Amino acid sequence: MKFLDLAKVYIRSGAGGAGCVSFRREKFIEYGGPDGGDGGRGGDVWAEAVDGLNTLIDFRYQQHFFARNGRPGQGSQKTGASGEDIVLRVPVGTEILEEDQETVVADMAELGQRVLLAKGGNGGFGNLHFKTATNQAPRRANPGLAGGERTLWLRLKLIADAGLLGLPNAGKSTFLAATSNARPKVADYPFTTLHPNLGVVGVDGVEFVIADIPGLIAGAHEGRGLGDQFLGHVERCAVLLHLVDATSQTPVEDWQTIVEELAAYGSGLADKPRVTVLNKIDALNEDARAEKQAELAVAVGGPVLLMSGVSREGVSEVLRAIRSGINEDRLRQKATGQEDTPWHP
C-alpha cells in the first residue's frame, strides 16, 4: 500500500429541503386549513479519527464528499426526510487545514475524535408554520437553506514516541529493522528511504513507537532532495534519535547539517530532546571510534553514544537513552506472551 500523508478534499454539506404549501381538502371537513410540512435538514460532513489506518491513500482516489440534501415537505403535515451525513474516516494524527494549508481546522490526535466540518442547511418552513389568527390560509413557504462548501487539506503526522533523524545512509532503517518487527528496505548500496516507517521497540519491559523518516540533506528546507515535508511526522515525538555515520569523513559537518535543517523547519523541533549516536562503529577500530566520538561530543556539547545496527553493539544502551526521554504515560508494558497465572475453566 502506497504511503500518502497529504491530500486535498472538497466537501459540501446538504441543502435543506423546501417547505410545502398545501391545504386539507377532505370530504366532510368544512375548514381544512393549511397542512404543508417543513423540509428536511441537509446532511452534515464529519471527520472521524479511526483505528487501523496509517495513510491517506483512500483520499487519492476520492476527493469529493457531498452530503445528501434534505427532502422537501409534503401535505398532511409531513416533514421531509433529513439528508444522510457523510463521514471522512482519517488516521489518528491527521491535521485538517484550510485551503491556505496554514490555518488548522482540527487536529485529530485521539482515537474516536469527531469534528464537524460542514453543517447541513435547515429545512424550510411549510405554510402550516405561518398560520395565525389573522392569516388562516397562508400561501407561502420557505426554501431550505443552502449547505456549506469548502476545500480542505488533510495532513498526516504519525503518532510516534521517538523519531529517527540523519542524513541518507546514516543507518536509520537498519536500526529500525534490528530493533523492531518493521521491515524497511535495507541494502548494501547507497539510497534513501522514500516513505516514513513505524516500528514498535521494546526494552526493559516497556514498548514505544519509533518513526523512521527519509533522510535530510543540506538545503532540505528550500526543497532540495525530498525536502523537509516528512519532518511533520516527528513533531509529536517526545525525543529525537540523531544518527551520525561513523564512516563519514566529516561527522561533525553531517551532524551540523541536520541541526540547521531542524532550526530552519521550526515548530519546536530544534528544542526537542535529542540522543546523538555515532552509528556503524563496526567498521572502525577502537582508536578511530574514540577519536570521532570525542570530536563529535565537543560539537554536540554533550554525550555521544556508540552503536552498530548491524552487529547490535550498543543498541540496548541507545534504547535505554531513548526510553529515559519519553514520558511515562507514553510507555506501554511489553507483552510477555504468557499469563502469569494459567487459566482454568
Image: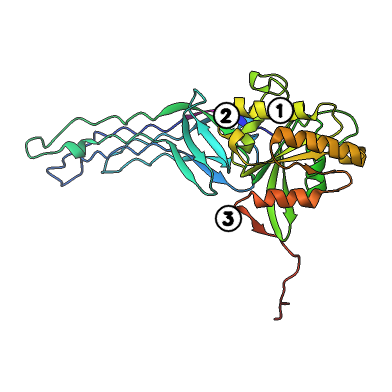
Q: What's the CA distance linking mark 1 and mark 2?
A: 16 Å
The mark found on residue 164 in the picture is none
Sequence-wise first label, 3 or 2: 2
Q: Residue furthest left?
A: 134
Q: Nearer the viewer, residue 79 or 57?
A: 57
Q: Nearer the viewer, residue 48 or 125?
A: 48
Q: CA distance from mark 3 to mark 1?
A: 32 Å
Q: Position of residue 251 (x, y in %)?
A: 79, 30
Q: Nearer the viewer, residue 112 or 127?
A: 112
The amino acid on which the numbered mark 1 sits, given as a three-letter code, is Gln
x and y percentages locating residue 45 in the rendered image: 46, 37
Q: Which residue is mark 3?
A: 329
Q: Is residue 159 magenta?
A: no
Residue 183 occupies quadrant = top right
Note whether residue 280 is visible. Answer: no
Q: How is the image coloured?
A: rainbow
Label 1 or label 2, whichever lies nearer to me, is: 1
| Quadrant (top left/top right/bottom left/bottom right) for the C terminus | bottom right
User: Residue 176 placed where, x, y %?
Assistant: 78, 44
Over which residues does the magenta segment extend?
7-11
In the image, residue 331 lies at what x, y percent? 63, 55
Q: Please name the residue shown 87% across and 32% down the image.
A: 247
For the point 36% across and 28% down, the residue is 146
Label 2 belongs to which residue?
A: 266
- Secondary structure beneath disc 1? helix
Which badge, 3 or 1, comes first in the chain's sequence? 1
Q: Is residue 9 magenta?
A: yes
Residue sitting at 34 percent across and 40 percent down? 80
